[in-house]
Image (spheres, helix red, strand yellow):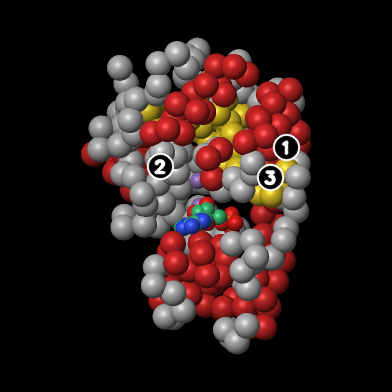
Amino acid sequence: MPRYDLHCHSTHSDGLLAPAAVVARAREHGVDVLALTDHDEVSGLAEASDAANAAGITLICGTELSVTWERITIHMVALGIDPANATLGEGLAGIRSGRSTRARRIADALAATGIQGAYEGAMRYVTSERLVSRTHFARHLVAAGHARDMKDVFARYLTPGKPGHVAHDWATLSQAVGWIHAAGGQAVIAHPGRYPVSARGLRRLLTEFRDTGGDAIEVVSPSHTQAQYVEFATHARVLGLRGSGGSDWHGPGESWMELGALPDMPAGVVPVWKDW
Ligand code: AMP
Ligand code: MN
Ligand code: MN
Ligand code: MN
């Protein structure tokens, strides 16, 4: 069976390697079918596609959309999109423009706690002038000695309730699903185990997603425990959603799982790639 990895990032969002280098690394690690899913962005897909053709692996065009649902941030992976689709392109451009104003507010919030110059610091880590993310703030804050490592800096400063976190409205769930479908893709709820919701809230999220036309749940993810593979496989079966899997790889030394190092999809789940 081919080896799938359907979630990873490049320098076109908050990853550390250029798209072609991500593809080369995926191939070295035995990936046959790779989706590049940069946050709110499709600009890396042309380079990734060329690299995949040259390397003899299959590139699935993807992106990972930022969504606000019941005031929490949800990520939605899109798979098999047409990167030239105007509806999706405009939707993503809208999300990205919100990121610039948010970055200023994050820097202001950090300044209020005594950390000056975080905006300029984060900008030194930005690798695409089109997109700034908390990851870029995180890399700067770690380098400047405000935290030990990436995990520590998010826990101390950049997550809800912490001094450098600001609330932000991204796209809605139904907008995101609509844009993905307009572009011919499948909509996947990314790493559902990561969201700060109760079991009941999670069922509500997944049910609303399914009712909005959503296609799949990311079952296999480094954000999940073995027990959660089983839990999300069950949700997928019960709700009639397919299952996806991805390493969410961001860069050497910064990721919980290597490209392509995913365990198998639990039995009984219809994989998102069934009709590819
Ligand atoms: P943003 O889209 O700007 O809110 O940034 C979200 C990104 O921050 C995620 O895609 C991850 O790459 C990164 N991130 C979030 N939480 C953590 C964490 N606890 N440790 C490391 N990276 C994280
Ligand atoms: Mn990221
Ligand atoms: Mn994510
Ligand atoms: Mn991701």
N-term-proximal mark, 1 vs 3? 3
Q: Residues within 10 Å of mark 3 (few under 14, many from 20)?
A: many
Q: x%, y% of residue 69? A: 73, 43
Q: CA distance from mark 2 to mark 3?
A: 21 Å
Q: In terms of secondary structure, where does tag 1 sit?
A: helix
Residue 2 lies left or right of residue 67; in this view the side is: left
Q: Is residue 212 above or below residue 65?
A: above
Q: Which residue is mark 1?
A: 173
* Tag 2 residue: 222
Q: Which residue lies at the image location 30% right of the left edge and 17% below the top edge?
A: 1
Which amino acid lies under the numbered mark 3 shown in the image of this protein?
Val
Type of the residue with mark 2: Pro
Q: Quadrant of residue 34?
A: top left
Element at label 3: strand
Q: Nearer the viewer, residue 62 or 112?
A: 112
Please state which amino acid type lies under the numbered disc 1.
Leu
Question: Which residue is depicted at the point 40% across and 16% down?
Answer: 267
| Disc 2, SS | loop
The label shown at residue 67 is 3
